[in-house]
Every structure is written in C-alpha cells, then in structure tokens.
C-alpha cells in the first residue's frame, strides 16, 4: 500500500507536531486531547484508520508543487479538522457520559484548526469561501440525512466535505486553483466509496438506529422499483445481501466511481490507489458471500467441510477485507 507507506516518516512528524500543540491545551483537556489523538494515530496499530484525512495533502504533489513543509502543515491542519468533526459526530450519534468535556475539547481542536489555516491563508484568500462551503455542506448532510441513504457520489461525500480543505488548500498555495473542480470531484468519488465501505461494515447498526446507509438505501430502492412492500425488515435486507447478490451490485457501483475517477485524467495515483483499495475490499466481500452461497447450495456437509478445513489451516474464510 504505497499510498500509505511512502509517507510514514511525514506522518510521524505530523502527529508529533499535533501532540505538541495539544499539550499546550489547558489541563486536564490536554491529556484528554492526547488520548483522543492517539486513538486516530495511524502509527498506533490499534488506532482507527482515517487515512485520507491526513494523507490527502501528500497525495496532491503531482498537481500542486509545494515545499515539503507545506504538505506537512496542511496535513497537520487536517488532523485537527478530523479531530474536531469526529467529536461532533460522536456527540450527534450518542452523547457520551462526559459530553461536556468532549464538547469543550472539540472547541479547542476547532481553535487549533483555525490557527493553522490562518498561518497559511490570509483573510482575503478564496480558501475561506471554500471553508464556508465545505462546512455548510457537512452541516446540511448530518442534520438532514435520509435514513434511506444515497449512492450519488456527491451526496455520499457531503458528510466528509471538510476533508477537501486539504486538496483545495494545496491547489491554492500552488497557484493551481483552476484544477479545483476536477480535483474536488476526484476526492468526492473517493470519499463516496469510502462511505460505501463504511456503510457495508455498519449496515446493521445503521438499520437499527435508522441512520442513513447507502447499502440499505440501494436495496430499498430496488424493492421500490419492483413494486415490493416497504419499509423492509432486517431479514429482508439480509436476504438481499446474502441471497439476491445486492453486495455484488453495490461493489459494482463502487467500481463505477473508480472508473469515473480515472476518467478525470488527473495524475493522482495515490488517491486512485486508495480508491481501488476500498473498492477491491467491497468486491472481495461480495465474492466471499457469493462463494458461501454456492457452497450452501452445493450441500450443507460440503460447506461445513470447507469451513472446517479452512479453520484447521488457520484461515478465517468469513473475514472481510483488509483493515
């Protein structure tokens, strides 16, 4: 995964700088902030991985020629963007017991984000118009998302619109503002497939909570087009996934995003490789489900035997793609 491993030394510096800035927060929020940062540090094996948030500035090198320090500064700013908006998401999904502390910490992350961007962009820079646009898009997406979800890339990507502060910021610093529409579309396509991968992993939880979910939305749309009864029960969603091949069609939609990304003709090989990593993971999951279905149709004993042989060989055949 060269889209990640090529930049590990830069990420080490970026997260070291982030920790230094968070250490300057007033106690005890500085300790809470360090713990929150550690939970997302890609160099921490047990951390949640949100690669595009902090890698996107480095992926912009082919179209935005900048000094190396500028990429690190944009990455650092996007780390604070990530931390701030993730806290907002956490509080919206299910407010934790210490929600007041989380809210206060989020405001400190927000201040850090603004300080970092102000050091890069003057008050008259068009960057701040994009900043307003992306935050507004995020606000509308999280406040009024439909439980049915959508597979339209632009709509799927709106919840992650602030990520594009990194790509647009790099273009503006490099004097390549004319590339913003195409690059933003490329990032949206990738963010859409990232959301699709998350929706596959989380569809049951989203269904139970009535959260928006692209996979569930696609299945409901297919049933609606066929004139079938709605809303669907969970067992109907499960049947669509495991019996009717819904995940295959879903993975094909993700691949179509990749085809559209290639069609833009941008030399963003790391972004494209990251997209392919996500889309390939969905395709692999779909293939595993199809294989399981074939084995079950071929006879329960044959399926049990294949499972037993895989387990004794130390293989988990039901494990989803790489994480």
Image (cartoon, grey):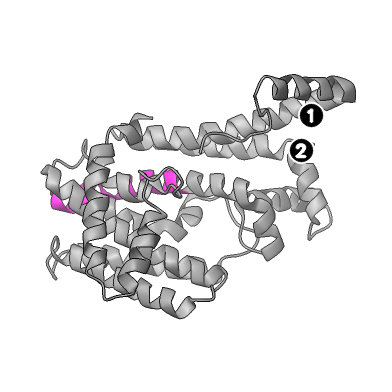
With respect to residue 118, does 45 lie above or below?
Answer: above
In the image, residue 322 sits, relative to residue 138, either above or below, namely above
Q: Which residue has dot 1 on it?
A: 293
Give me the C-alpha separation between circle 1 and circle 2.
7 Å
Residues packed near mark 1 inside 10 Å, few (<14), some (14 to 19) or many (20 plus): some
Q: Magenta region, mostly helix, strand or loop?
A: helix
Residue displayed at 75% across by 19% down? 309
Q: In the image, which residues are magenta?
A: 167-191
- The residue at the point 49 percent across, 76 percent down is 98
Q: Where is residue 146 in the image (x, y as percent from the top left)?
A: 61, 65
Lateral position of residue 318 relative to residue 88, left or right? right
Q: Give left or right: position of 153 versus 124.
A: right
Q: SS for tag 2?
A: helix
Please tell me whether mark 1 sits on a helix, a strand or a loop: helix
Q: How many marks?
A: 2
Q: Which of marks 1 and 2 is nearer the N terminus?
A: 2
Which image quarter: residue 20?
bottom left
Q: In the rendered image, which residue does mark 2 sit on?
A: 242
């Amino acid at each position: 995964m060269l889209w990640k491993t090529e930049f590990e030394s830069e990420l080490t510096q970026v997260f070291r700088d982030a920790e230094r800035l968070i250490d300057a927060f007033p106690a005890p929020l500085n300790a809470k902030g360090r713990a929150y940062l550690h939970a997302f540090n890609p160099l921490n094996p047990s951390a949640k991985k949100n690669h595009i948030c902090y890698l996107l500035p480095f992926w912009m090198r082919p179209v935005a020629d900048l000094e190396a320090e500028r990429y690190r500064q944009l990455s650092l700013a996007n780390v604070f963007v990530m931390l701030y908006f993730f806290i907002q998401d956490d509080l919206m999904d299910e407010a934790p017991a210490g929600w007041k502390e989380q809210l206060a910490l989020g405001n400190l992350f927000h201040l850090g984000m603004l300080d970092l961007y102000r050091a890069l962009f003057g008050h008259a820079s068009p960057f701040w118009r994009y900043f307003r646009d992306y935050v507004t898009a995020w606000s509308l997406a999280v406040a009024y998302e439909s439980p049915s979800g959508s597979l339209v890339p632009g709509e799927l990507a709106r919840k992650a619109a602030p990520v594009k502060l990194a790509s647009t910021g790099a273009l503006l610093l490099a004097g390549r503002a004319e590339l913003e529409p195409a690059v933003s579309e490329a990032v949206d396509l990738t963010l859409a497939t990232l959301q699709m991968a998350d929706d596959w992993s989380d569809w049951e939880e989203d269904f139970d909570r009535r959260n928006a979910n692209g996979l569930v939305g696609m299945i409901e749309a297919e049933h609606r087009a066929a004139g079938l009864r709605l809303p669907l029960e969970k067992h109907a969603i499960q049947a669509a996934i495991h019996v009717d091949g819904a995940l295959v069609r879903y993975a094909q939609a993700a691949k179509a995003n990749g085809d559209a990304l290639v069609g833009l003709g941008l030399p963003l090989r790391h972004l494209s490789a990251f997209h392919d990593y996500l889309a390939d993971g969905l395709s692999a999951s779909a293939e595993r489900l199809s294989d399981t279905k074939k084995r079950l149709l071929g006879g329960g004993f044959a399926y049990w035997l294949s499972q037993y042989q895989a387990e004794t060989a130390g293989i988990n055949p039901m494990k989803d793609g790489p994480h």
